[in-house]
Image: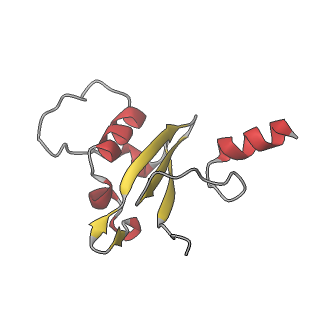
Amino acid sequence: MKNIFTTQEILLMTNTKFSAQELSEKNGLPENAGLPQKQKLAEACWNGMLKEMLPELYITKNNKPLTLWELGQGRNMLYLQLGEVDSIQDVFFTLNPYALNETYCIN
């Protein structure tokens, strides 16, 4: 029997009002005060603030949150891959526009 795992991909567009909003740190330390806004958003995702930022997209499986396995940075976006296990996404079904671009270059 083949195992079926839950995965989720999210594209966060930078240079938007959402990404420009103030992000409060969980621990209350302003250590990222001098970083660019895209870097602050990436740090917030790694620090587990995705549930607070996007509660409507937050998925749990058996009451356990999905793990953030990959956070890629593009020119105007952040690519997040969450899942139960670390898995390689099929380039034909991924939301990552850079993976699709690599496929066209191969052809």
Residue 84: image x %, image y %?
Answer: 40, 60
Which residue occupies 27% across, 52% down? 49
Taking the image as shown, residue 32 lies to the left or right of residue 12, namely left
Taking the image as shown, residue 66 lies to the left or right of residue 81, namely left
Work out which quarter of the rendered image holds the C terminus and state it: top right
**In the current view of this chain or complex, which residue is farthest to the left?**
28
- When asked about the image quadrant of residue 60, the answer is bottom left
Which residue occupies 52% across, 52% down? 87
Residue 85: image x %, image y %?
Answer: 43, 56
Q: Nearer the viewer, residue 42 or 100?
A: 100
Which residue occupies 16% across, 46% down? 26
**In the current view of this chain or complex, which residue is farthest to the front?**
1
Q: Nearer the viewer, residue 34 or 27?
A: 27
Residue 86: image x %, image y %?
Answer: 46, 51
- When asked about the image quadrant of residue 55, the answer is bottom left
Work out which quarter of the rendered image holds the N terminus and state it: bottom right
- When asked about the image quadrant of residue 22, the answer is top left
**In the current view of this chain or complex, which residue is farthest to the top?**
34
Taking the image as shown, residue 2 lies to the left or right of residue 102, namely left
Residue 39: image x %, image y %?
Answer: 38, 33
**In the current view of this chain or complex, which residue is farthest to the right?**
107
- Count of numbered circles on the image: 0
Q: How is the image coloured?
A: secondary structure
Taking the image as shown, residue 25 lies to the left or right of residue 89, namely left
Q: Nearer the viewer, residue 49 or 68?
A: 68
Q: Nearer the viewer, residue 22 or 47?
A: 47
Which residue occupies 67% across, 59% down? 93
